[in-house]
Image (tube, rainbow, N blue to C red):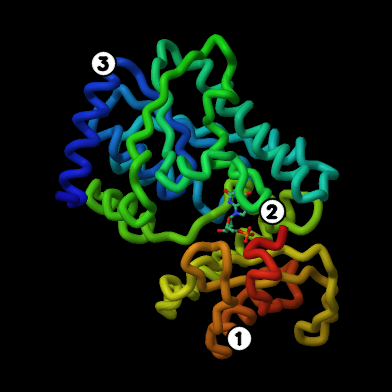
Amino acid sequence: LWTPANIVEDAIANIRAQVGDAKVLLGLSGGVDSSVVAAMLHRAIGDQLTCVFVDNGLLRLHEGDQVMAMFAENMGVKVIRADAQDKFLSRLAGVTDPEAKRKIIGRTFIEVFDEEATKLKDVKFLAQGTIYPDVIESAATKNGKAHVIKSHHNVGGLPEEMAFELVEPLRELFKDEVRKIGLELGLPYDMVYRHPFPGPGLGVRILAEVRKEYADILRRADHIFIEELRKADLYHKTSQAFAVFLPIKSVGVVGDARRYEWVIALRAVETIDFMTARWAHLPYEFLEKVSNRIINEISGVSRVTYDISSKPPATIEWE
Ligand code: XMP
């Protein structure tokens, strides 16, 4: 009988049988899949699990702190937080091509993960949040774009002397099943049902060279948009919503002062499979509120636009 409780029970027995008393390493991204694996492994093997969370400087506002609060502080999971913002930003300096940015972010991720993994002694297993659709696709690319979250902790990317065996407890599950299991394991609804976030993070939502100044502005705009979506009960009516930083300056006025500042685009889509998508027909009053807040609260932004492109021909992300 398929119930989340049965699945969890079976998975835990399997993990214990596979792992014994060995140590397991997990790359925790804060996304649904790796979070469910963390919760499951923690329940199965407790302290034998160590997670590595890489802060690449391209995360959403407060995201790193939230991951640490939920897993390390609340659940007592061992999480090593690797603060690698400077490393990512320096590697990305001067790079504007979207695929080049993806490659750099992916490679740097593996490097930081390796560094942390190498410091740990006697790790025998590497856990991954591989789910059934990943197994079917089995390639590290989708729509021609690298899926960094899924490919980052592939054994292939790790040094040869670290011969890990894989633990993939979600391998036979679909996304909706993974979510139900997440709830069963006690993860909060808001984390289990959150919108997808790409592995390269804000890196592919800054349509220019990635700079800290831009990322900081984008993080705040994104936070306002998502906060208002939740308040208006629209978050779960959209499949994915986010802000994009446009490296264009536009004139605005505040009181008597003329401003010449950046542009933020808002993107929200409705989709079942993310292969095709319709732009979300959000209420005008709602968009007005978000626009006003972004322009009033973020000093570097003078204009907000709403993306009314569907996929195809546009993609969901702008890069
Ligand atoms: P596009 O932009 O191709 O996006 O319509 C479809 C879905 O895939 C996500 N996406 C990515 N996820 N690494 C990821 O992990 C990537 O490089 C990447 N590019 C796009 C996107 O957010 C959307 O959910």
User: Which residue corresponds to mark 1?
Assistant: 288
Give the residue type that dot 1 points to.
Glu
Bin the neighbour count of mark 1 within 10 Å (Cα to Cα): few under 14, some 14-19, many 20 and up: few
**Who is closer to the viewer here, 41 or 315?**
315
User: Which residue corresponds to mark 3?
Assistant: 21
Give the residue type that dot 3 points to.
Asp
**Who is closer to the viewer here, 260 or 121?**
121
SS type, badge 1? helix
Between discs 2 and 1, the one toward the N terminus = 2
Q: CA distance from mark 1 to mark 3?
A: 56 Å
Asked whether, in this view, residue 45 is left or right of residue 90, the answer is left
Between discs 1 and 3, the one toward the N terminus = 3
**Who is closer to the viewer here, 26 or 8?**
8
Question: Relative to 298, does residue 101 appear above or below in the rendering?
Answer: above
Question: Relative to 190, does residue 18 appear above or below in the rendering?
Answer: above
Question: Relative to 91, does residue 264 appear above or below in the rendering?
Answer: below
Query: In this rendering, which labeled residue sits more in front, label 2 or label 1?
Result: 2
Between discs 3 and 2, the one toward the N terminus = 3
Q: Quadrant of residue 317?
A: bottom right
User: Which residue corresponds to mark 2?
Assistant: 204
Q: Residue 230 appears at what percent x and percent y?
A: 43, 72
Q: CA distance from mark 3 to mark 2?
A: 41 Å
